[in-house]
Amino acid sequence: SVAGVLVPQSWLDEGEENRKTLQEYEVGARYYAFGGAAASGSDQANSLSQAHRNAAVMTGVSLDDLDDFWGNLFPQMFDVSDKTKFPPVFGSNHADYLAAGPLKEDWTKPCPREWTFEERREKCISFQEAIYGTERLARLEAIKKAVDPQFIFNCVNCVGNNLPEATKSGDEKDEEPSPAEPEPLLGNSSDEPSGASFVSSFVAAISATAVYSLINAI
């Protein structure tokens, strides 16, 4: 099991010693789909983290080696001066489902894999925050709540999946008040939906799916 760490170009440029250090941590091949205008070609309306744009490579780090990574490499590679803003570290496409950030109270300590999901949720930087960073994740979660307040589109480790609203049971959701039923149109006593109504519903569903895909795209 590995975590895809986004290695900053600026850190590699500091010297040959850093490049040698990286080789000691790597597991498997590097991912090189970076460079060019990726660092600046953004309208600021997408989910891709700045760490992804600034990366030289994405490399696999074994989850068994994360203790050493969080304690040594992480503070060298990323700005950890503001303890209220965890930086984006992982690339979302190649992050193991068990990957998580470090302990919330100590960023130099890994999240124990033997903990339950409840313990990890309470005490560790989440999978999502380790990918998007604190600030960008907050914006994406706000969009998620506005577009899909009932969390109909919910997948493991996607944006919003770890929020309390997403983990409610079906019974709890059923107990929430639903919008009032609209009054029937005059002259239409049929219980069957009209063709226009069906098309509108279909278009709305497609639009919601497209927006959701944009939120979780990189």
Image: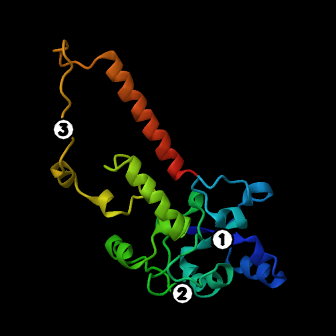
* Disc 1 from disc 2: Cα separation: 21 Å
* Residue annotated with mark 2: 108
In x, y percent, where is residue 209? 45, 40
* Disc 2 from disc 3: Cα separation: 51 Å
When the figure is inspected, residue 135 is found, relative to residue 64, above or below; the finding is above
**Pointer 2 or 3: first along the chain:** 2
Q: Is residue 93 left or right of residue 196?
A: right
* Residue annotated with mark 3: 180
In terms of image quadrants, where is residue 185? top left
**Pointer 1 or 3: first along the chain:** 1
Q: Is residue 107 left or right of residue 22?
A: left
Crowding near pointer 1: few (<14 within 10 Å), some, many (20+)?
some
Q: Nearer the viewer, residue 167 or 28?
A: 167
Q: Is residue 155 visible?
A: no
The kind of residue tagged 3 is Ala
Identity of the residue furthest to the top in this view: 187
Query: Which is closer to the viewer, label 1 or label 3?
Result: 3
Q: Nearer the viewer, residue 2 or 47?
A: 47
In x, y percent, where is residue 100? 48, 72
Crowding near pointer 2: few (<14 within 10 Å), some, many (20+)?
many
* Residue annotated with mark 1: 27
Secondary structure under tag 1 reads loop
The kind of residue tagged 2 is Thr
Pointers 1 and 2 in contact (C-beta within 8 Å): no
